[in-house]
Image: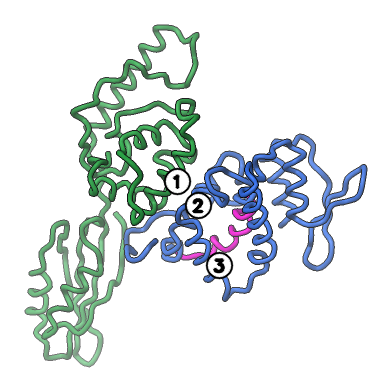
Amino acid sequence: MGFGDLKTPAGLKVLNDFLADKSYIEGYVPSQADVAVFDALSGPPSADLCHALRWYNHISSYQKEKSSLPGVKKPLGQYGPAGVEDATSAESKDDDDDIDLFGSDDEESEEAKKLKEERLAAYNAKKAKKPAIIAKSSILLDVKPWDDETDMVKLEECVRSIQMDGLLWGSSKLVPVGYGIKKLQIQCVVEDDKVGTDQLEEQITAFEDYVQSMDVAAFNKI
Amino acid sequence: MALRELSSLEKSLGLKKPNKYSTQGDKKVPVLQSNNGPSLTGLVTIATHLVREANRPELLGSTAEQRAVVQQWLEYRVTKLDNCPKEEIKTILQDLNQYLEDKVYMAGDTFTLADTLMYYGIHRIMVDLAVQEKEKHANVSRWFDHVQHYPGVRHHLPLLVVLRNRLYTSGHH
């Protein structure tokens, strides 16, 4: 989790992407999560980061009631998309002390508070241990040769020679299409963030001596 | 349709006793029958009246400009969005997408009646959109998803899933 360093263009880009389909950092109303991230910025994002800028302008309209917004401020590294290295963990770890989960619950007994804190700490520890889930997809590709004289063994070799980070080739078979022509059906597993079908298609059709065309026959999220 | 919308609006405004409505003509224009005084006709007229009755004037806009913008979108809803022919949907979505790029709500930074009514109005269009089209109009989808989760708005309509599919990464702005 986290946006990386929000003072750098890279961090702002992550924020911009994150906000493309969201109005707030968390949930559907402004909260301390927004304030925390807002405060981490050094100024309004540039105009080409339209989503980040829209959010920035929107949050600045809450400037006056900033402290009364709901929620609890968490360390900055706990917001944002999964899978981005937390760049802030070193500086702000231990501010569990001023946690006040529901705003103004003064009658809360000392014991209950302690219990809550313990659970929260345990939860955070558990969460930290769990690795971020990587979205993967299983894709079935149809690779079609030019004619019945195309060397299918060589074709498969070429396809399997494509290597990318996050790409894993699986089983394959030859399926007759007619007139003695066979197409290659090959399974592969990709990490969604790293490999796209466009990329695959580009690379496979690059072997133009063997490959006439390539289709995605099936696409399943795992 | 419009009647269910008005009763949802009543609920979200927290009005205690439901009003009586009927419809008029082929287009089913809603009419509000009141015990004292003349009846009110038309979705926007009734909705605006309900907001005033609930004593929530901020939903009609808090500055003069915002009030004007809210009014504009309410008008847009009944004149453009309702009964719009299929071939115009694309243009409407494109326009909205561009408009919403730098806005969180229809009328800027606060939630207004324009959001509620535009949401009710555009829901039937969003239902039919393919994932790819939702992705293409990312700003509309974001606004839509936001409003449908906004406390108390979505009553009679089913929740739509708006998710970002990383398959179509090209060209969303």
What residue is pinned by disc 3? B92
Q: Secondary structure at mark 2?
A: helix
Letter of the blue chain:
B
Query: Could you classify mark 2 by the number of other residues whose Cα lies within 10 Å: few (under 14), some (14-19), or many (20 or more)?
Result: many
Query: Could you classify mark 1 by the number of other residues whose Cα lies within 10 Å: few (under 14), some (14-19), or many (20 or more)?
Result: many
Letter of the green chain:
A
Give the main secondary structure of the magenta stretch.
helix
> Which of A121 and A184 lies nearest the eye of the viewer?
A121
Cβ–Cβ under 8 Å for marks 2 and 3: no
Chain letter of the residue beneath label 3 in the structure image: B
Q: Are marks 1 and 3 on the same chain?
A: no
Query: Could you classify mark 3 by the number of other residues whose Cα lies within 10 Å: few (under 14), some (14-19), or many (20 or more)?
Result: some
| Screen quadrant of the N terminus of chain B | bottom right
Residue visible at 48% across and 61% down in the picture: B97
What residue is pinned by disc 1? A23
What residue is pinned by disc 2? B143
Whole-number angstrom distance, CA of label 1 to CA of label 2: 7 Å
Residue visible at 31% across and 68% down in the picture: A218
Q: Residue furthest top?
A: A110
Cβ–Cβ under 8 Å for marks 1 and 3: no
Q: Residue furthest front?
A: B64
Chain letter of the residue beneath label 1 in the structure image: A
Chain letter of the residue beneath label 2 in the structure image: B
- Amino acid on which the number 3 mark rests in the picture: Ile
Whether A10 is drawn above or below B130: the answer is above
Drawn side of residue B35 relative to residue A6, left or right = right
- Amino acid on which the number 1 mark rests in the picture: Ser
Residue B172 position, x and y percent, is 38, 62
